[in-house]
Image: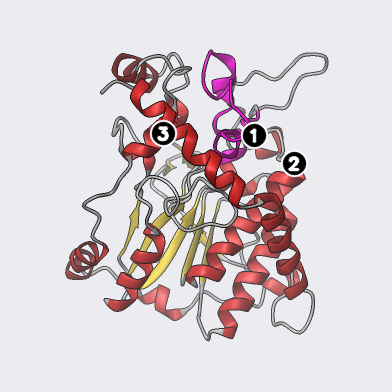
Amino acid sequence: MKPRLLIAASVLAPAILFAQQDYSANIARQVAKVRAETASGVPFHPTWDSLAAYRTPDWFRDAKFGIFLHWGVYSVPAFGNEWYSRNMYIPDNAAYKHQVATYGPVDKFGYKDFIPQFKAERFDPNAWLDLFAAAGARYVVPVAEHCDGFAMYTSAMTPYNAAAMGPKRDVVGELAIAARAHGLRFGVSSHTAEHWWWYGAARAIPSDVRDMTSETAKLYGPAAPMELPDAGSPANPTKEPDPNHLERWQPPDKPFLDAWLARSTELVDKYHPDFFYFDWWIGQPAFKPYLQQFAAYYYDRSAERKQRPVLTYKEESMPANVATLDIERYFHLHPLLGLRRTR
């Protein structure tokens, strides 16, 4: 495939979408609504003491087998793993070498240019759920948005979503309907927090991220560096600080945190998930008041619907009594030192 044939289409579509909605205004309205609706007259408020009334539901204790799905634009190049959208901009990474050899320089063909190719022509949510139910799964959790910034659902917070681009289908919504029709609990997975720095390394090389426009910034931005800058010197965009000390990472700013809260609560409003999974970077200290706000809103809306929700966190992102601790495969028990990250 010649990448130059796709670039025009991938740039034109966002231009039309940007003209239709004021995404910043949508984010501001959603955040204001969330804050207002958790202020009074609800069982949960955005404080750790209030959230401590949460209890992990029995249905989750009994559900021994669930299925998580990583499926998105990164499935088009289908190389390496779901980190392809970041790794393809890091010159010493195998994904970068594959990208350049297969599609050409990353300033000519970037991640955004895979979106028109992500068509999902054979996506059949009921066939998927037939398989999951036959396997004995009790719940299913697709990735609603990975770190790449592409929402797999109909969103009023970003034009880069699967209902508006690529498949032009509400993938999360269709899976929610199919899961519940098959008697499974339904959840969503959000990795949006990591998007703050996800494309930052691409600023160090000639790339479409470094050359982002006001339109493509809605996908690639903010592309911040991970590390805090040293006194008098700029941050190194390719250096990853200690992943066990997120206070040493550059914190996200208020516009990003507001967008994170708006997108996360939009998922609550649209799909009423029984299960909500967050990835590890919500442990960055700047997220704390926003996590409290999200948890209160999620628990309150679930209580209105008589749902018993599961909200997961990793490591020490939240106090132990306000949500459900998630321990994944990238930890193993070291015989002398205890739990250690191995990713």
- In the image, residue 32 lies in the stretch drawn in magenta: no
Question: x and y percent of residue 166 in the render?
Answer: 37, 45
Give whichever of discs 3 and 1 has the lower sequence position.
3
**312 is higher (above) or lower (below) than 39:** above
Q: Residue at x 41, y 22 (%)?
A: 109
For label 2, the residue is: 253
Label 3 – label 1 distance at C-alpha: 23 Å
Q: Is there any visible trace of residue 47 in the rendered image? A: no
Dots 2, 1 in contact, CB < 8 A: yes
Front-most of residues 308 and 7: 7
Q: What residue do we see at 67% from left, 44% from top? A: 284
Q: Residue at x 38, y 46 (%)?
A: 329
Mark 2: amino acid? Asp
Quick one: which residue is furthest to the right in this view?
Answer: 232
Quarter the C terminus occupies: top left
Q: Look at label 3 and name its amino acid.
A: Ala
Query: What residue type is disc 1 on?
Result: Pro
Query: Which of the two residues, 161 or 135, is positioned nearer the viewer here?
Result: 161
Q: Residue at x 44, y 18 (%)?
A: 106
Q: Which residues are magenta?
A: 195-224
